[in-house]
Image: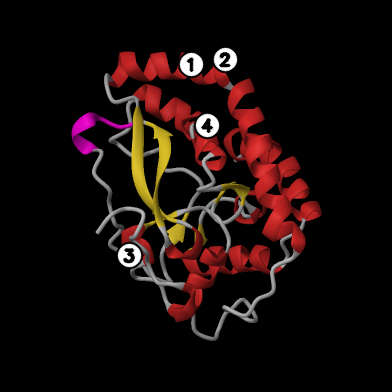
Amino acid sequence: MTQSAQTVSHPSQVASGAGDAGATRQRSTYERIGKGLIDRVFGLFLALITLPIVIPVAIVVFIDLGLPIFLRQERVGLDGKVFRVLKFRSMEPDRRASRVPSFVGTDRRLSHKSDNDPRLTPVGRFIRKWSLDELPQLWNVVFGQMSLVGPRPEMVQVVERYEPWQHARHQVKPGVTGLWQVSARGEVPMHEATHIDLEYVESISLATDIRILAKTVPAALGSRTGS
């Protein structure tokens, strides 16, 4: 099956349990038109102005790990379609395979970063700590695969084990940042993170996106310099 044709749990399979976030959810004009336009224009702007950061990071990653510089990992996006998310590599080359946590399910706990993963190199740990590894995802936004704001894209193997109600989060594009990232500190149960994602799905607006974007940098800095 080709990447473009691969899907995981089409929204029509979403069962009750996610409130009104079903297939009949009405999308606002902002969500249908404005959000995508803003994403591509502002995403390109951010991708270009961050080049003075991205280029040195790319050089350091190359020195540390060699080629390839980028990790292209399959994630689940809008309407369950699978795409490849771009990230800077941060782990040893023989340990880059996608993993599925053995505790996937409603009891799985999510954290913003796994900075204590022994597979990380010192350089990888640094760029992950400051989210520099995620800067290439701005090009996923430019290409229309992601949004600046939305639920985080999850691994295919994890989504295949979702409960039916959790698939409602795929009614919007995944985001570089989102409501969960700016509102939850530390680890949270998967079902709680999904509820936060669905809260965003039900409240998408320009004001909501601006508020989340405005909180993203302070939240990221706080999670790294705080407790």
What is the spatial separation of the Cα atoms under label 2 and label 4, in whole angstroms?
12 Å
Q: Earlier in the sequence, mark 3 or mark 4?
A: 3
The amino acid marked with disc number 1 is Ile
**Foreground pick, 178 / 168:** 168
Circle 4 sits on which residue?
135
Residue stretch in magenta: 90-95
- Element at badge 1? helix
Write the residue at 62% across / 38% down. Answer: 220
Q: How is the image coloured?
A: secondary structure
**Foreground pick, 226 / 219:** 219
Circle 1 sits on which residue?
55
Cβ atoms under marks 3 and 4 closer than 8 Å: no
Circle 3 sits on which residue?
103
**Foreground pick, 43 / 92:** 43
Is 62 in the magenta?
Answer: no
Write the residue at 65% across / 55% down. Answer: 179
Q: What number is the disc on residue 52?
A: 2
- Element at badge 4? loop
Q: Nearer the viewer, mark 3 or mark 4?
A: 4
Q: Earlier in the sequence, mark 2 or mark 4?
A: 2
- Element at badge 3? loop
Cβ atoms under marks 4 and 1 closer than 8 Å: no
